[in-house]
Image: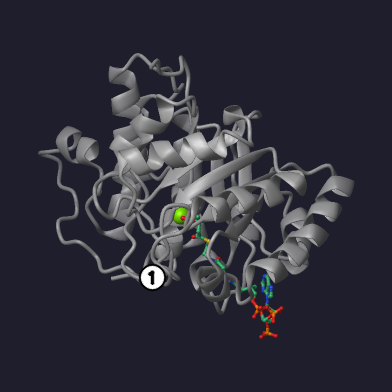
Amino acid sequence: MTLPARVQIVEVGPRDGLQNEMAVTPVAVRTQLIELLARAGLNRIEVGSFVSEKAVPQMAGTAEVLASIRVPKGVNLSALVPNMQGFAAATAAGVGDIALFAAASESFSRKNLGCGVDESFNRFARVAAAAKDAGLAMRGYVSCALGCPYEGKVDHTRVVETAQRLLALGCYEISLADTIGVGTPVAARELIQRVAQVISVERIAVHFHDTYGQALANIFACLEHGVSVVDSSVAGLGGCPFAPGAAGNVATEDVVYMLNGCDVETGVDLGKLLDATRFICASLDRPPESKVARARLAGESLPSQRCATNSE
Ligand code: HMG
Ligand code: MG
């Protein structure tokens, strides 16, 4: 098994990370974080969501974030869009790509999107048609790809079907999400092998939450099977407000360190990435979840007490 020569990292901290903080992170902090991440070489950054402020108050202000960010050309700034109301707001805000987020579990879809899977796809179909007219590219997520907080084990067939439906709507990439971080490397590998039977592996991304500490091992297993796009979150922030107990995403620092050590190119400068870690941890007054950040920033006066998050 060989590893890819290059891996694209999709930085989801400003969205998946900050959506799960107890407090609403001010727009100015979100903006500065994104600018620091871009300066570190991250050129795909999920900046927020156009969802109901009542459902996820932490993502209110995503339009203001987009309006104030200054990043070099070539940095793609994307956001989650669940329906036409979100699409209208996202396009008015000048978003780069949009991301549709479906689930392989009916119960999770109802909790997360307020509707079942079929109804979510009715909404996505309208968004996809409008996105096509507007020339906006779409990414797709499949939540609960390795397990659901409400239904437990999720059949691979459901994951494959959901991924295919997103692809049929025009998504250029499908991110398979272990929403609650229950996967292990063999399960992750088997899922990739199964999905890659119907979707070209170049179009598969992986999105691991690190609840059980398996994320890096899972990523490695997926890279060995041809995956070359990995979602991660600075400082390991994150979780989903609708997945109780789920921890943050795998930390970007840890992914970059592992890939540097494996001679896999990412284009990310670890030193500059740690500037973003320092900044966001000081702003949130919490230590990084990233082991690499803890090792590299040891001796600096980082916040020491861990703040409670929504999912705890
Ligand atoms: P709904 O209740 O079915 O929608 O919510 P509705 O059309 O009945 O509208 C209800 C209210 O929401 C109305 O406001 C609408 O205006 C408003 P009210 O009249 O009550 O004042 N509304 C909106 N407001 C702003 N933007 C919109 C929008 N749509 C309706 N786009 C909805 C449906 C999807 C909106 C809601 O359930 C929602 O916002 N859910 C939040 C979903 C979310 O952000 N989840 C977390 C991100 S997903 C995730 O973390 C997983 C991922 O990381 C992968 C993984 O790890 O698994 C991607
Ligand atoms: Mg997530």
Q: Amino acid at mark 1?
A: Ala
Instruction: Tell me: residue 305, above or below residue 79.
Output: below
Q: Check disc 1 and report the residue beneath it.
A: 23
Viewer can see residue 308: yes
Left or right of 271, for residue 233: right
Left or right of 132, for residue 90: left
- Residue 89 picture location, percent across and down: 74, 62
Q: Which quadrant holds residue 256?
A: top left
Q: Which quadrant holds residue 225?
A: top left
Instruction: Tell me: residue 135, above or below residue 238.
Output: above
Give the quarter of the figure containing the C terminus: bottom left
- Residue 77 picture location, percent across and down: 62, 43
- Residue occupying the point 79% across, 53% down: 128
Viewer can see residue 32: no
- Residue 179 picture location, percent across and down: 42, 57
Q: Nearer the viewer, residue 81 or 207?
A: 207
Instruction: Tell me: residue 175, above or below residue 224.
Output: below
- Residue occupying the point 63% across, 52% down: 161
- Residue occupying the point 37% across, 35% down: 219
Q: How many marks?
A: 1
- Residue 267 picture location, percent across and down: 46, 21
Task: Specify the farthest residue to the right.
Answer: 133
